[in-house]
Amino acid sequence: MKFRTQCTTALVLILLAGCATEWRTDAPVKPTTYAASGPVSAGSVGRLPRLAVTTVILHREADETEKATLEWQARNETIRKELRQEIVRYLVEQKGYDARSVDEPPPGDEQAVRATGMRLGVDGIVTVERRLTKPWSTAKAISNIFLLNIPLVNALNAVNLRISIHETASGRMVWMKEMKGEMPDSPKTTPDVKGALGDLENALPTQLRR
Amino acid sequence: MHFFSRGVASGVLGLAAPPMYASGLIVGGIILAPGALILSSMEQRMWERMVTALKTADFEQALLRATRERANSKLETAAQSGTADLINVELVVNAYGLVRHSPDRLCFIASIDLIANRGGEHWLRDRLIISTRERSPDAPPPQCASHEGMAQNEGQMVRNTAAVYAEVLAAMVIDRLLNRSKP
């Protein structure tokens, strides 16, 4: 009976957690711009108060002809800029981080993260990946019925926003959050930054970084 | 054709509908009732973890300890230079704990009063607040998170936040005392 209850609870938890996935490191998090001390636990991302948010990696579905237009490129830039601004604003105002935008792509590997972080004088690098899809056509919706909702399940599990934080000290990823569910490409579509960053620990306050 | 005359089809549907609705209700109930019970018990466990974490954090003692330690190190130079006077400092904890910020979010808030007397006279009084509203200008933003975020790892975020707030408030208290001492 207990096993059955646990199984049911696990099933409900999986269904509830389906819309977002969070990962965090078990290893101690090390800052580089100040000497870590104080009451924050060793695994807390809050020990990395100075963050650089790199250019947003954007994936948008469209036809090749549409992709060649200037409007398409301009819209891409607007989406990237607005999303990054919103993330920086949320990190600064709601979470107390010294976050700032940097106009460069995310570093590729751990060595590049270390080099970039040291050059920028930050404790960590924030990487943002956004995926927008074309709205479902009638044909796709009808075919979904015949395919036993498999396309729908895939759409619900598709990642629309991924935010990850790498620490400068080691170059390793220390925190990552994925928001799931296909997001239609529309001017009205706004990213759920609060949902993505809401459970992140606050930055270590400035008074405790002296 | 006579069988399908007017009224017969409606009569059949009328007979079939109640059992269909009843079965729908039963099936829905079977799905929803355990789900609601499980969610309710999960939320109760989350609250229990958060409350236990708050109790074990011992915020008042942590604040007192942090203030004493900071006072010893920061005010030592003033004492050695002979400029220090005997100041009686009282810290009154008005409130600390979790408040519901929105249906799915909780915020850890804290409010303390700093009362300082010098030579038996009132010298300084200030309220230090870490909250979503009316936050002190030098206070950090409050730690907010979902119920799950606050409760995970036996309320680790609650314990960490209580420890950080105690240290930050102690630092804010010492900063105010030092600023007030300036000529």
Image: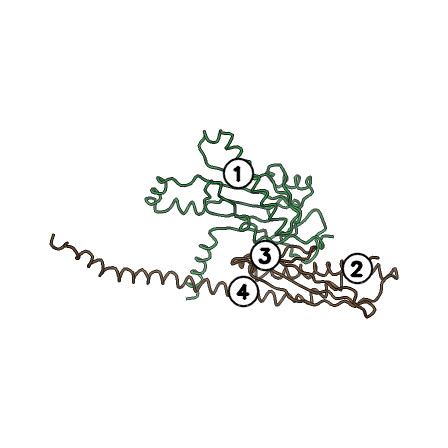
Q: Quadrant of residue B66?
A: bottom right
Q: Colour of chain B?
A: brown
Q: Indicate the position of residue A50 as horizontal and vertical percent values.
A: 67, 47
Q: Label 1 belongs to which residue?
A: A58
The residue drawn where x is 82% and y is 57% is B182
Label 2 or label 1, whichever lies nearer to me, is 2
For disc 3, the neighbor class at 10 Å (few under 14, some 14 to 19, many from 20) is many
Residue on which disc 2 sits: B180
Which residue is rendered at x = 46% and y = 57% of the image? A13
Of mark 3 and mark 4, the one earlier in the sequence is 4
Q: CA distance from mark 1 to mark 4?
A: 39 Å
Residue A102 lies, with reference to residue A18, above or below; the image says above
Mark 2 or mark 3, earlier in chain: 3
Residue picked out by circle 4:
B47
Mark 3 sits on what residue?
B144
Mark 2 touches mark 3? (CB < 8 Å): no
Q: Amino acid at mark 2?
A: Arg
**Mark 2 crowd level (few <14, some 14–19, many ≥20, 10 Å Cα):** few
Q: CA distance from mark 3 to mark 4?
A: 15 Å
Q: Position of residue B115 (x, y in %)?
A: 74, 66
Q: Nearer the viewer, residue A70 or B59?
A: A70
Question: What label does residue B71 carry, if any?
Answer: none
Q: Disc 2 sits on a residue from what chain?
A: B
Please, what is the three-letter code of the amino acid marked with disc 4? Trp
Q: Colour of chain A?
A: green
What amino acid does circle 3 point to? Answer: Cys
Q: Amino acid at mark 1?
A: Leu
Give coordinates of residue B64: x percent, y percent.
Answer: 72, 66
